[in-house]
Image (cartoon, rainbow, N blue to C red):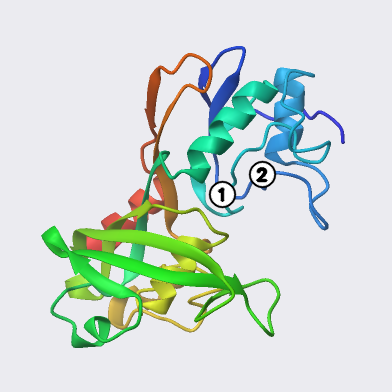
């Protein structure tokens, strides 16, 4: 794996970790089909050999991931001790992670369909809680699916921030308790509020009327990892980072607000 001189937006860096704001379209680490141009290639150029080896040669420093077309915040370990300390925080769910998304429809406690859907409930403030198991889809190995058993426990909380397009869409805040592959995307699709632009979990969904053509050109899931909070794994100092919505999602919201 070779270092590549790819620009990184660094929000914080010390001897033990680095926090970066990943753009959409960038894969986190090399995989079949994407051997280069990844965040890891960029990190190897930026940090040299100062990345944790816990994840192995293919994933140096990588403690957690976000999807290629999801933008936002990631923390990367530079020391093995930091890697273990961060991994422990992810394991005990003490990491604070908030995502902003644009979804079809408006999740509501007044929707009888949601109230009758297994694994869904509403908490104070009309906050939707989704608790299911997730596993790889039986027929499409690139997808994840909600399953009744033999999956991984997954919890997402969803809060409506803004209704759009007369209730045809909404800006929502998604809080992760667990961090499974495609968790927010799968959960939002499961409850009937798939993310706009998601080519895997909402490819057949369209907004009616004037917005159809414009929204169809939004070619990635409207999902941004906007807040990341944790304790520094070495010093114990509380750290909290925020990333504003990127221009493409801002433009999408503006379009649907018009």
Question: Of callouts 1 and 2, which one flags the residue occurring earlier in the amino acid sequence?
Answer: 2
Q: Quadrant of residue 120?
A: bottom left
Q: What residue sits 13% from the left and 60% below the top?
A: 124
Q: Is residue 181 left or right of residue 95?
A: right
| Residue 110 in the image: above or below residue 49 | below
Rendered-image quadrant of the N terminus: top right
Q: Give residue 9's position: percent from left, percent from top.
A: 54, 27
Question: Answer yes or no: do the residues labelled 1 and 2 have beta carbons within 8 Å?
Answer: yes
Closer to the camera, 23 or 61? Answer: 61
Few, some or many residues within 10 Å of mark 2 (<14, 14–19, 20+): many
Is residue 245 visible in the rendered structure shown here? yes
| Residue 215 in the image: above or below residue 173 | below
Rendered-image quadrant of the C terminus: bottom left
Closer to the camera, 212 or 195? Answer: 195
Q: Give residue 74's position: percent from left, percent from top.
A: 53, 37
Q: Secondary structure at mark 1?
A: loop
Q: Secondary structure at mark 2?
A: loop
| Residue 23 in the image: above or below residue 48 | below
Q: Give residue 89's position: percent from left, percent from top.
A: 49, 36
Is residue 73 visible in the rendered structure shown here? no
Q: What residue sits 27% from the left and 70% below the top?
A: 169
Few, some or many residues within 10 Å of mark 1 (<14, 14–19, 20+): many
Q: Give residue 216's position: percent from left, percent from top.
A: 46, 72
Q: Is residue 250 left or right of residue 74?
A: left
Q: What residue sits 54% from the left and 58% below the top?
A: 180
Q: Which residue is mark 2?
A: 28
CA gap, disc 1 and disc 2: 7 Å
Residue at the limit of the structure toward the right, as seen here? 1
Q: Is residue 164 left or right of residue 3?
A: left
Q: What residue sits 43% from the left and 49% below the top?
A: 224
Q: Which residue is mark 1?
A: 66
């Amino acid at each position: 794996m070779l270092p590549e001189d790819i620009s990184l937006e660094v929000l914080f860096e010390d001897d033990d970790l680095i926090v970066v704001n990943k753009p959409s379209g960038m894969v986190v680490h090399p995989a079949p089909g994407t051997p280069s141009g990844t965040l890891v290639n960029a990190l190897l150029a930026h940090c040299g050999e100062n990345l944790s080896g816990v994840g192995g040669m293919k994933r140096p420093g990588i403690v957690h991931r976000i999807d290629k077309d999801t933008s936002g915040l990631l923390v990367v370990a530079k020391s093995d001790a930091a890697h273990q300390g961060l991994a422990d925080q992810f394991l005990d769910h003490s990491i604070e992670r908030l995502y902003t998304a644009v979804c079809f429809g408006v999740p509501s406690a007044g929707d009888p369909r949601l109230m009758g859907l297994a694994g869904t409930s509403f908490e104070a403030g009309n906050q939707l809680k989704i608790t299911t198991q997730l596993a790889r889809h039986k027929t499409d190995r690139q997808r994840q699916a909600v399953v009744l058993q033999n999956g991984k426990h997954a919890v997402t909380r969803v809060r409506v921030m803004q209704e759009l397009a007369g209730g045809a869409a909404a800006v929502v805040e998604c809080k992760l308790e667990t961090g499974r592959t495609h968790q927010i995307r799968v959960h939002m699709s499961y409850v009937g509020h798939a993310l706009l632009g998601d080519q895997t979990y909402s490819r057949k969904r369209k907004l009616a009327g004037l917005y159809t053509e414009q929204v169809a050109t939004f070619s990635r899931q409207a999902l941004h990892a906007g807040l990341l909070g944790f304790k520094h794994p070495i010093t114990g100092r509380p750290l909290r980072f925020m990333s504003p919505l990127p221009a493409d999602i801002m433009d999408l919201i503006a379009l649907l607000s018009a």
